[in-house]
Amino acid sequence: MSRLLAALALVTLYLACLVFAPVGALPDLPRQPPLLPPSFAHPFGTDDLGRDQLAAALQGGRTSLLVAGLATGLALALGVMVGLAAGLARGVLDEVLMRGAEIVASLPTLLVAVLVAALFGGSMVALALVIGLTRWPLVARLVRIETMAVLGRTHLRAAFALGATPLHVARRHLLPHLAAPLGATAGIVFGGAILTEAALAFVGLGDPAVTSWGQMIASGFTLLGLGWWLWATPAAMIVLASSLVAAATLPGVSVARSLPVGQSP
């Protein structure tokens, strides 16, 4: 599958979750006959209380989209600002920012998320903040390396010689150059956020007020002998979303790594 097709499929999946997911959470879904296997009327079957699993899976996708989107946006914003500042300033500021990034990068995201969820509750906003605040070093390193690699080019030296400010150079020349590698990095953060949110919900540390794929898998395991679809369908949704993210972004990351420093795919 090409990157474009994978990206379109991923966008379509999440738009479907946003548009067709019923309002509210799992307890708000209408009741049907319980434990119906997958059929034309109920493609994902129904659970032990008669709730349609497809509707629940769409609600879980909406939760994953919001958490992953917020976390990715935060990581990109922080990473781009820190990376540009370090690459343009060099010297002491570069050292301070990169050492700070290394400290944050050494923190295990899932463990931090578990601690925050246990202490302050596993709300979607809190989880998105934890993921975003622990994943920005990946973006910052990429932006710093690319910034330092292109600073010596003729058009940038000319821009500085004509009096352009670092902010103008960053906005006008550096950010367009970074668009492709940033897109690939954003996919890595996005996919990681989906898995982290599902893992926390699976162990009961997710947001109880929203439906989650991890929450559905955990509930399905308790009824494993009554219906395989109760855990298999939300697990398949996680695998599908993660695979589409990987197909859309990892080829770009591999190409970026294979290029000489200073080039982008």
Image: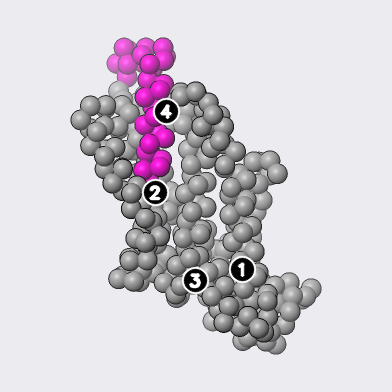
SS under mark 2: helix
Give the percent coordinates (x, y) of residue 265: 56, 29
Label 1: element kind: helix
**Amino acid type, callout 4:** Glu
Residue span colored magenta: 135-164
Q: Earlier in the sequence, mark 4 or mark 2?
A: 2
User: Label 1 sits on what residue type?
Assistant: Pro
Q: Is residue 155 magenta?
A: yes
Q: Is residue 24 visible?
A: no
Which residue type carries mark 3? Phe
Q: Is 10 drawn above or below residue 110 in the view shown? A: above
Circle 4 is placed at which residue position?
Answer: 146
Q: CA distance from mark 2 to mark 3?
A: 22 Å
Are the two marked residues, 4 and 2, in contact with CB atoms closer than 8 angstroms? no
| Percent of width and height locating residue 130 | 36, 57
**Front in this rendered view, residue 25 or 3:** 3
Q: Is residue 153 left or right of residue 101?
A: right
Badge 2 is on which residue? Answer: 135
Calculate the distance from the C-alpha at mark 1 to the C-alpha at mark 4: 39 Å
Relative side of 65 to 157, left or right: right
Q: What distance separates the C-alpha of mark 4 from that of mark 2?
A: 18 Å
- Which residue appears at 51% of the width and 58% of the height? 194
Name above or below for residue 261 compared with residue 182: above
Q: Which residue was labeled with disc 1?
A: 234
Q: Residues within 10 Å of mark 2 (few under 14, many from 20)?
A: many
Look at label 2 and name its amino acid.
Arg
Labels 2 and 3: the sequence-earlier one: 2
